[in-house]
Amino acid sequence: MARSVALLRTLFLYLFAPAPLARAQKILFGHSISNPPDVNHLAKTWHLTGTAMPSHRALILSPGVADRIGTIFSRSPLTTNDFEVSFTISAKAGAPGTFVNDGFAFWYVQDNATQLVQGPSEEHTHNQDEIMAGSWQTNYANKGLNLLGFASAYKGFGLFFLNGEGGKTISTKMNDGSLTPLVGNGLPDKNQLKLDYQSGKDMLVNIRIKPEKIEVRIDGDALEVQTMTQPGGYIGFSCYGGSKEQYNPKERSAVIELKGLKVTNYASGEGEAAIEETEKPKAIPAGEKEDVLGSHSSFKSHRDESEAIKELSNMVFKLVVETRPTREQMKASIDSLSKRVQSVERSFQMLQAEIEKKSGHKLNEEFAAIKKDLVQLHSEAHKSHAERGQKLEILHSSIAEVKTSSNAGEISGHLDSLSDSNAKVIDQLTGEHQRMFGFYIGAIAFIVVSGLSLYHKFSCWEKKHVL
């Protein structure tokens, strides 16, 4: 009887007892990053250095430049040790160079990472003189930041994506600050996956951090670390572009992009400090905006020249485009005029052939003969004019000779002879002039008569064709 009562009680409790409450899941927006990233949210809750920068499509951790680092860490700690971090990462290897020891890491550390990297970054990684001299990396590492841009003696958890001598690996490692692992010396850890994370494909990474262990899932593969985690840690990423013995500036290492980060709290508390709402900056009118980098850069003159060349190119392009219809119209008009001229030439040729056929004369040859006669007539006139000028020069020279070499008695005799010679010359010139005038009159009469006869023939032919 007692056993039956106990069984009934157990069955009643099993059927009607309330189920245990499921753990509440809450997205921690203060430690999450949208895709594409919100620059105002990044500036308020995250600290970025080096090559880490937002773009219109993702958060770029590394643009593929060798010997450069980039970091992004949360400014405030997580107040929970029971949460999940989920992010999508894309890494595409550069070409054609091959770089070693490049990679990136996800961190959950008890150190205030922002305070650790802020000062050294401002002094060295953002120092133009040290970057040009190549001394920034040594000075930065001397501050203890010698593991993919972060401290090797970290306190917490690290998930490392490495491209080393052993190939491409993904590994985890816990550290309490007593170890100083480096790439190639302690990393990658034995707890690793052989996975080509630089294939260029989007890769989903889930990191489940629990009080007693950490589980990592990457596209079906998993890693697990048995450890005791503590709340109050900071999350973030760091990356290093790799190195090469002979570096060519045109070569690129892997381009790494973070395409969204979501942190979900599984504990009962808030999981993060409250984020103060800040007023969004007012939109600046287009006319009042200032390009600070462009106006204060050392390459401002080059940019001004480029802008002038760009404006000139736009003006030339605009002129070419706007005048193209006019040019096409002019070309069409010229082509049409050329066709008309060719048609008129063909008509004249046909008319000439018809005239030659009807008259039995070759007009071209007759006009050529007339032209030849006129040219010959012009040459004869020019020749006779030259002869007359030569005779006048001889006459003037004779008169001058008489004046200088003869006495008064002899002058009268010479003058008489000269008068006779002059009279003969004048008679000869008059006769020659009359002959030439008559020849000119005859030539003009011949041309007029020929023209009238041709006109008469054309009129007769036109009447015949009309009739």
Image (tube, grey):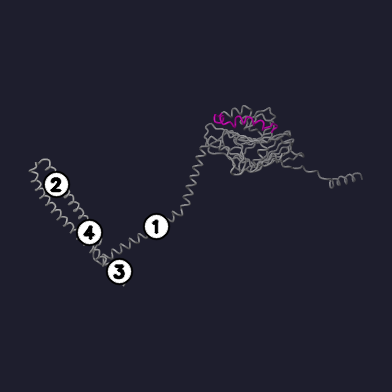
What separation in Å lies between label 2 and label 1 (alpha carbons)? 65 Å
Q: Is residue 79 visible?
A: yes
Q: Is residue 196 visible?
A: no
What separation in Å lies between label 3 and label 1 (alpha carbons)? 32 Å
Q: Are marks 2 and 4 in contact (CB under 8 Å)?
A: no
Which mark is first along the chain, 4 or 1?
A: 1
Dot label at residue 395 = 2
> Magenta includes 200?
no
Which mark is first along the chain, 1 or 3?
A: 1
Which mark is first along the chain, 1 or 2?
A: 1
The part of the chain drawn in magenta is: 109-134
Left or right: where does residue 420 sit relative to residue 261? Answer: left
Dot label at residue 462 = 3
Dot label at residue 335 = 1
Residue nearest the viewer, comparing 133 with 194: 133
The correct choice, above or below, for 418 with respect to 269 in the image is below
Crowding at dot 3, Cα within 10 Å, few <14 / some 14-19 / many 20+, comes out as: few
Which marked residue is nearer to the observer: mark 2 or mark 4? 2
Kindly indicate the quadrant of the structure image that contains residue 57: top right
What separation in Å lies between label 1 and label 4 (alpha carbons)? 36 Å
Q: Residue at x 60, y 27 (%)?
A: 139
Q: Residue furthest bottom?
A: 467
Which amino acid, mark 2?
Leu
Dot label at residue 370 = 4
Helix, strand, or loop for circle 2? helix
Helix, strand, or loop for circle 4? helix
Which amino acid, mark 1?
Asp
